[in-house]
Amino acid sequence: YCAVFVLCIAVVLLAVAFVAGVVVVLIAPAAALPAGSLPFVLAMAALVLFKHRDNFKRLRNGTETRMERLALIRRWMRKHRS
């Protein structure tokens, strides 16, 4: 039982380290921006969300073209499994 416990702890620690690394990679570009650029960044994010609002609606409804293709591929793969 001791070996299983140690293995579980090691897996949890590796997962935490991986998540921490991903968080650092995602935050690093924002930390490199000049202090006064926050309004610009927020405005650009709002613009992107506004320009893609129809795509978000289609994704929410499940009618986005890529989603339909992905569903067709999944169905085909299920049908043709060995």
Image: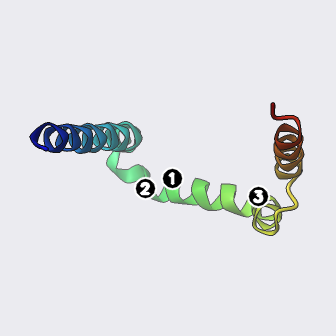
Mark 3 residue element: helix
**Relative side of 48 to 66, left or right:** left
54 shown above or below 71? below
Among the 4 quarters of the image, the one containing residue 32: top left
Badge 1: how crowded within 10 Å, few (<14), some, or many (20+)? few
Mark 1 residue element: helix
**The residue under label 1 is which amino acid type?**
Val
Observer-side mark, 3 or 1, equals: 3
Viewer-nearest residue: 40 or 53: 53
The residue located at (39%, 44%) in the rendering is 30
The residue located at (83%, 38%) in the rendering is 77
The picture places residue 16, in percent across and down from the top left corner, at 26, 44
Mark 2, residue position: 38
**The residue under label 2 is which amino acid type?**
Leu
Viewer-nearest residue: 53 or 21: 21
Q: Earlier in the sequence, mark 3 or mark 2?
A: 2
80 shown above or below 65? above
Mark 1, residue position: 41
Mark 2 residue element: helix
**The residue under label 3 is which amino acid type?**
Lys
Badge 3: how crowded within 10 Å, few (<14), some, or many (20+)? few
Q: Are marks 2 and 1 in contact (CB under 8 Å)?
A: yes
Mark 3, residue position: 51
Q: Are marks 3 and 1 in contact (CB under 8 Å)?
A: no
The picture places residue 31, in percent across and down from the top left corner, at 32, 43
